[in-house]
Image (spheres, rainbow, N blue to C red):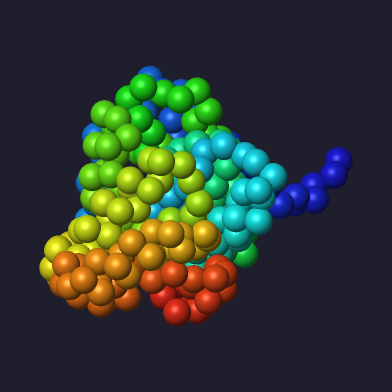
Amino acid sequence: MDLTVKPLRLNCNIFFKANRPSNKDEVPAEINYKYSTPESREKTIAILGASVDSQELSPYTKQANSLARELVARGYNIVTGAGSAGIMGAANKGGHEAELNPENKNHGECLGLMTQEAWGNEDYRNCNIIKRAGDDFTRIADFDKVAKHIVAFPGGAMTVAEATSFIAKARYEKGDKKPDVSFIGPYQGLDFQYETLEKIKTLGTNRQTIYKSYNDVKSLLDEKFPNLK
């Protein structure tokens, strides 16, 4: 009889799948309080961007994947629009890989916020979808509720709407309510608009006090997100 004690190997995928919604009917109608506390919000980054793939988007999906993986490994939470493709999907995959890495002892979580009318490509496998928001516009308030930091990658018209909403909040909100907004990607046109507002004295502040653009993920990580371990 072989009495050798063999190490127990736990399948982390089983753990995560057992504790996460696997379809839209299991997604909560409201956000769990633990994700909206000041402490949780301070360490949560919303990653905004496209939910579709394209060859032109590929360099940015790689950066989103890298950013999410490193943030979660450093102890931060990330939250996306819960899509399984494009920027969203790449970030979800990177974040979940960090969750499953046994070397990341104090990792954060990969979260998602979907809309009430499901798009059909929700990423139940890689992110914990914590609410079904009414629509894309009301979801902006939910991002603000759970994440102090916003990182906008290239996306569609809705991504621009989300980004400009957070720029407005960064301009007028005070203290802990003020979001921290960053851009990665071709947002020169948007920056030009705010530069113009600054020049004609209608913005009322230096635009660099309400958002900042980065050329790469490393510079963003180095400047804003030290290791929380």
Q: Give how far across and how far down residue 188 sits, in percent.
A: 46, 63
Q: Give how far across and how far down residue 203 sits, in percent.
A: 19, 68
The residue lying furthest to the right in this view is 1
Which residue is found at the position 53% from the left and 76% from the top?
Answer: 219
Nearer-the-camera pick, 151 or 156: 156
Nearer-the-camera pick, 13 or 65: 65
Which residue is found at the position 40% from the left and 46% from the top?
Answer: 159
Q: Give how far across and how far down residue 51 sits, in percent.
A: 52, 38
The residue lying furthest to the front in this view is 200
Q: Is residue 77 visible?
A: no
Q: Is residue 114 visible?
A: yes
Quarter holding the N terminus is top right
Q: In this view, does 66 lie to the left or right of 51?
A: right
Q: Give how far across and how far down residue 191 sits, in percent.
A: 38, 65
Nearer-the-camera pick, 55 or 226: 55
Nearer-the-camera pick, 88 or 1: 88
Which residue is found at the position 26% from the left and 51% from the top?
Answer: 165
Q: Is residue 81 left or right of residue 90?
A: left
Q: How many labels does the image show?
A: 0
Residue 178: image quadrant is bottom left
Which residue is found at the position 28% from the left and 44% from the top?
Answer: 140
